Amino acid sequence: MLIYSSRLKKSLINTSYQLRLIHNSLLNQINPAPPDKILGLTDFYNNDPNPLKVNLTVGIYKDNNGHVSTFPSVLKAQSLVNYNYNQKNHNLAYLPINGNQFYSQNVLNFIWNDSVNGLGQDYLTHDKINFIQTLSGTGAIAITAKFLSKFLSNSIWVPNYSWPNHLNIFKQNGFDDNNIFKYDYYNHEMGEISIENWLNQLKANVPKSKTPQCILLHACCHNPTGVDPTKEQWKTIIDTIYDLKMIPIIDMAYQGLESGNLIDDAYLLRICLSKGDWSNGLYLCQSFAKNMGLYGERVGSLSILTPLKSHSNLKQNIDSQLKPIIRSVYSSPPGYGSHVANQVLSNDDLKMEWFNDVQNMVNRLHSIRVKLYNNLKWDDLINFKQQHGMFYFTRFNQDQVNLLKEKYSIYLTDDGRLSLSGINDSNIDYISQALYDVSKLYSLK
Ligand SMILES: Cc1ncc(COP(=O)(O)O)c(C=O)c1O
């Protein structure tokens, strides 16, 4: 009895000691972070019981039946890859840190030769491009952020608005809040680019002489606004950025989704190349998520173009510095998707078919814009000179976005961005009516 009660006492002391430890744990200081601005909304959508619900939040292409379908060219590439896997006894070995060498060669050629109409030839011939296969576009931006903040600059200008993950990536990878600036990209009231404000702001605030500052540019199909500068405007923008000795980081997540032509859409790269060498490098973060539909396979790349006259060891030095950065984050990129993309790019017939698939996707996105326009008569829907891509920016305020969600179960991102690919023949009338009703609350159209 006595032994039993002393054991009980000991165990009570232990328990209260443990409770105190848990109570004082530093873990208790962790507050909940806000949900992801885009992917978090899908959870709400999934739990919504309304049979008419529509998810227009995520940038994933869906066909007219509402299905995320694989492009015919990519399906064929997949079956060739699967066949080879079988032949090689399902070899699932790691890729090298900087990725699949065949993929790298083909993507390098596709971007810096095909897409820029040969303007990158000197960089290819003189071996002045550091190229790595990355964990899709996000991985490319994160590695760029880590590399730049470690070696060149931890100040960056990001457009206002931008894909919300941009700020997140730079904040988590070496850029602190005080060194992240937003440039006036978009005039909300007018629904247009505010190029004058943007460039005046840079001229007034970017010091030429000190450490160079980085600037993030969307190559085409600006996310979330869908509004891009014209080519003439881009030339002026690039001239200014060049004069200010800024470091351009080009995010090319939607190549092909503007015009339907993958080559035409690389115009920003061509404009940057015609400017000449970028003394601190030109950084391209590219993704095959949207234009090859390889979303979950995480297939992308980072190219760093260094000056043609840079010293002969520079490429090796940069490669050697990129590797430990990659190794510390994801070690090496995923294999399967890179084999599929490589198959598409290395087979002339499949490559042509892929170009066609992209054009078909864009035709459908255009036709949705036109159908919405026929229902709503909102001019900016079909302002094809400026409005591009998978998204339409409604300019709805938070109340309007909430009403769409609560009354109609139509989900947009909080900034009022609507993914056109979730619209099809069966839901377009329901969506048009809801957009019309909500627009009456407060109209900028
Ligand atoms: C503007 C922009 N950049 C980059 C990405 C990166 O995409 P991923 O990491 O899927 O290639 C996205 C995806 O939505 C995007 O919209």
Image (cartoon, rainbow, N blue to C red):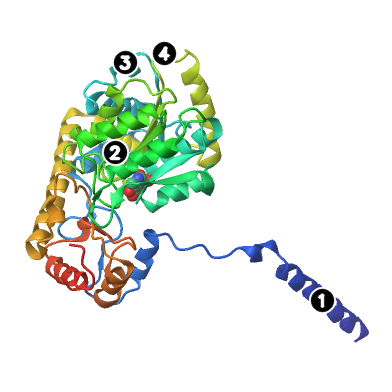
Gap between marks 2 and 1, in whole Å?
Answer: 64 Å
The residue at the point 51 percent across, 62 percent down is: 33
Q: Is residue 319 above or below residue 82?
A: above
Identify the residue position indicated by label 1 in the image: 11
Identify the residue position indicated by label 3 in the image: 122
Identify the residue position indicated by label 2 in the image: 219
What amino acid is at disc 4?
A: Lys
Q: Secondary structure at mark 3?
A: helix
Q: Nearer the viewer, residue 398 or 243?
A: 243
Q: Are marks 3 and 1 in contact (CB under 8 Å)?
A: no
Q: Secondary structure at mark 2?
A: loop
Q: On the picture, is 329 further left or further right than 24? A: left
The label nearer to you, 2 versus 3, is 2
Q: Are marks 4 and 1 in contact (CB under 8 Å)?
A: no
The label nearer to you, 4 versus 1, is 4
What amino acid is at disc 3?
A: Asp
Q: Earlier in the sequence, mark 2 or mark 1?
A: 1
